[in-house]
Structures are given as C-alpha cells and as structure tokens.
C-alpha cells in the first residue's frame, strides 16, 4: 500500500438507485379513509374482531373495483403520479390489483416480489409497535457473493433495509423489489392494503420495438 496518500473526498456517483417512495397521510386524511376501508372489509367478512395467533386473512385481489374501496384510489393515483414525475416517465399507470392483508399475532409475509407490474405498494390501515416495519432486500444479486464484516450497518453496506411505517403510511416501490414482513409481535391485528400498478395500454403503446426499420437495429 502507498503510505502518505489520502483519498478523503472522492466524488460519489450514485448509479442505478432503488427507490421506495413513502408518504404519511395526516390524521384528518387517514381517519375517514381508514373508516371507509374498515367498513368495506367488515362487509367482506374480514375477521377484524381478532385472529388467533398464527392466523392470516387476505381478501381477493379485485378490491380496486369495489365501491367501498374507492376512497383509497385517489391516494394511490397521487403517489403514482409523484413517482412517475420523479422518474420523468410520461406513460400513465393504472391499478391492476388491490387486496387487504390482516395479520394476526405471529404472522407476517415471506420474501416475495410482485410480478408483471411496474410499481407495487402498500397502504397501512392499522399498525402499531411490534408490527410497523417492512423489509426490502438488495436487488443486486452479485452483492451477496462477498459480504465482509462491517463496523456498522449503513444504507451503503446493508443487504436488508427496514422501513418503519405508521397508520396512514403509503409506500410505493418497484414491483420487482423483493420484500418481506416480519411476524406481528403486537397483540393487535396488522391491517394493510396492497396494490399493483402497471402501464395502461402496455402492449399497445410500449411493447413494440422503438427503433426505425432500415436505419440499423439490434433486432
Ligand atoms: Fe408484497
């Protein structure tokens, strides 16, 4: 090693960042919204009175088409519009599925991603201490080949990122980003609404080759 040299302030280029967009609705916003969602879930027969430890309940995936859950849709649309503006993407997104998750004590969600969509998200109707986190996993598989010991876990060296949420939080993230939810360590239910977003008219407007025939292509 070369003695006497320093490399204190290198320019830091952050390439290919992975985004999770998080917004916290205000109490006056999530109060009536959550009342509407809970009424809709009650009408569906969701076990809101309680679940036995270890039990989970999930609705079907079409709640975005049911009248009771329409109050959530403008918030999802606003979040999606914000994310698309951030990414400078002009193609509009549409909600392709929406479902409810009710986790009893001791239950969570194993590692997964949401295929065949562009963005996914979650809205938190009821979370509390012990049931207020979601874990996202490093999407670079090569990064796991060598994991040296670290003096401290930071955003720069972690392979898992825990995001803390509260009642009224809304998250958006790439649909391909793997995530998992730790078991509910509280005595109350953890209630969330999950959803997927895909480009409207994807096959018609985005899937065709983008180059001009005859001018050289990668075909
Ligand atoms: Fe998920």
Image (cartoon, rainbow, N blue to C red):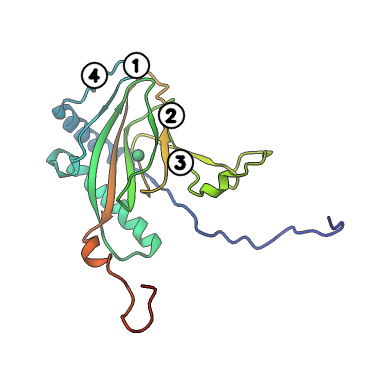
Q: Residue at x 34, y 64 (%)?
A: 89
**Residue furthest to the bottom:** 215
**Residue 164 % position (x, y):** 45, 36
Residue annotated with mark 1: 53
Query: Taking 43 as reference, is 73 above or below it?
Result: below
Q: Which of the pair 103/77 is nearer the observer? A: 103
Mark 1 residue element: loop
Q: Quadrant of the C terminus?
A: bottom left
In this rendering, the answer to whether 47 lies above or below 172 is above
- Mark 3 surroundings: few (<14), some (14-19) or many (≥20) residues within 10 A: many
Residue 104 left/right relative to 165: left
Q: Earlier in the sequence, mark 2 or mark 4?
A: 4
The residue under label 4 is: 49
Q: Earlier in the sequence, mark 1 or mark 2?
A: 1
| Mark 1 or 3, nearer chain start | 1
Q: Is residue 155 visible?
A: no
In contact (CB < 8 Å): disc 4 and disc 1: no
Query: Earlier along the polypeptide chain: callout 3 or callout 2?
Result: 3
Q: Is residue 51 above or below residue 69?
A: above
Secondary structure beneath label 3? strand
Pick the front one: 6 or 96: 96
User: In what element is the residue under mark 4?
Assistant: loop
Q: Which residue is mark 2?
A: 182
Quadrant hosting ligand 1: top left
**CB within 8 Å, label 1 to label 3:** no
């Amino acid at each position: 090693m070369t003695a006497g040299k320093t490399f204190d302030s290198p320019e830091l280029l952050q390439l290919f960042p992975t985004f999770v967009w998080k917004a916290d609705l205000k109490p006056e916003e999530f109060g009536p919204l959550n009342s509407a969602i809970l009424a809709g879930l009650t009408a569906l027969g969701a076990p809101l009175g309680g679940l036995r430890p270890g039990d989970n309940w999930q609705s079907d995936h079409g709640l975005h088409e049911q009248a009771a859950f329409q109050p959530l849709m403008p918030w999802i649309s606003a979040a999606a519009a914000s994310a698309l503006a951030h990414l400078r993407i002009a193609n509009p997104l549409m909600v392709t599925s929406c479902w409810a998750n009710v986790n009893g004590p001791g239950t969570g969600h194993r590692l997964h991603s949401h295929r065949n969509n562009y963005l996914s998200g979650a809205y938190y109707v009821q979370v509390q201490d012990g049931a207020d986190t979601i874990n996202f996993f490093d999407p670079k598989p090569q990064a796991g080949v060598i994991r040296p010991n670290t003096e401290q876990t930071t955003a720069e060296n972690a392979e898992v990122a825990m995001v803390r949420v509260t009642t009224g939080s809304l998250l958006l993230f790439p649909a391909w980003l793997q995530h998992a939810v730790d078991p509910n360590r509280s005595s109350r239910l953890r209630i969330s609404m999950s959803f997927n977003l895909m480009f409207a008219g994807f096959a018609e407007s985005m899937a065709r080759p983008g180059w001009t025939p005859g001018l050289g292509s990668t075909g």
